[in-house]
Image: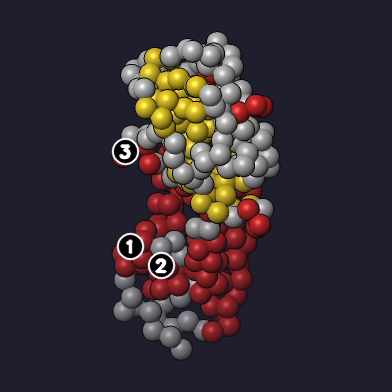
Amino acid sequence: MEKNKTKSPWLALILSLIIPGLGQVYSGLLLRGAVFLVVNIGIQWPILVGYLSPDVYVEPWWLKWGVILFQVAVSIDAFFCKVRYNKTDDIDAKDKLARIKRLTLPAVISVLLFGLSLALFIRTYFVQPFRAPTDSMAKTLELGDRFFADKRIYKVSNPQHGDVIVFKSPKNLKNILVKRLIGLGGDVVEIKNGTIFINGEIFQTVGMEGVNYLNAGKFGGVGQKIIVPAGNYYVLGDNSPVSSDSRHWGFVPATNIVGKAFKIFYPPARVRLIK
């Protein structure tokens, strides 16, 4: 026989606010809580995020509120689990097992919904996986490489020369591109003999070694000095001969930036930091 009145429903609620499922474990629903805990740990592994939604995702307004409401619902569930079990002083072991079995299916469904919501939340505001759609950034990014982009970094700091950035194409906002950031607003960019000049000085950073940038297009011809407008960026692909970039279609507005590419996670042989 098991005593339960000494445990607080409010503590169960707080525990599940901190870690989903912890309040259920505290309330005695070990299976229910374990499912929440395991899935919560699983979705912290960012690789799973890449399989939960397509490469291009625009979050609807209702999902932002849905994530918050679902988190609250998990915590309220923990609260009432404890209230329900506090109604009796003694709980027969068989009766308790039967209750746990009845709650298993709703728990699994709730956990799956919560896991998806949290994964989308992480994907929307923090880290998002992408797939290199072309070989325009080879050998930095090969065709088919899957990599992570940090979506928060440019909310707390400014883009820097040489960053590999992910952005919405100025030609079609539905297309997501990845290129190397060369020029910031106000910079004068020139491509001369395969080398990048910014404000009259040679520019090269880690990842650009051995790259021969070609003169091409309306914004990258021989002898052209391109002035980057304020609030815009000039980007180039490292695989210059095949890259469609700022040389051809111009500048990337700051509002189009999605994040900074920072790590290849697939295939295994290509796992590395992006520089």
User: Can residue 29 be seen by looking at this rendering?
Assistant: yes
Residues tagged 3 and 2 counted as in contact (Cβ below 8 A): no
- In which quarter of the view is residue 80 placed? bottom left
- Residue at the image point whose x is 41% and y is 30% from the top: 202
How many numbered discs?
3
Kindly tell me whether residue 185 is visible in this rendering.
Answer: no
- Dot 2 or dot 1: first in sequence order is 1
The residue carrying pointer 1 sits among few (fewer than 14), some (14 to 19) or many (20 or more) residues within 10 Å by Cα, namely some
Q: How far apart are the two marked residues, 3 and 2, measured between alpha carbons?
A: 37 Å
What secondary structure is marked by label 2?
Answer: helix
Q: Position of residue 244 (x, y in %)?
A: 61, 23
Residue at coordinates 58% horizontally, 14% vertically from top-left? 217
Which three-letter amino acid code belongs to the residue tagged 3? Ser
Q: Is residue 118 left or right of residue 188?
A: right
Which residue, given by chain and number where applicable, does mark 1 sit on? 14
Nearest the eye: 52 or 29:
52
The CA span between labels 2 and 1 is: 7 Å
x and y percent of residue 74 in the render?
45, 56
Return the residue nearer the eye: 234 or 214: 214
The residue type indicated by label 1 comes to Ile
Q: Which residue is mark 2?
A: 23
Amino acid found under the numbered disc labelled 2? Gly
Density class for disc 3 (Cα within 10 Å; few <14, some 14-19, many ≥20) is: few
Rendering coords of residue 113 (x, y %):
56, 51
Residue identifier under label 3:
157
Q: How is the image coloured?
A: secondary structure
Q: Nearer the viewer, mark 3 or mark 1?
A: 3
**Quick check: marks 2 and 1 in contact, CB under 8 Å?**
yes
Considering the numbered disc 1 on the image, is that residue within a helix, a strand or a loop?
helix
Label 2 environment density (alpha carbons within 10 Å; few <14, some 14–19, many ≥20): many
Q: Give SS at disc 3.
A: loop
Q: Earlier in the sequence, mark 3 or mark 1?
A: 1
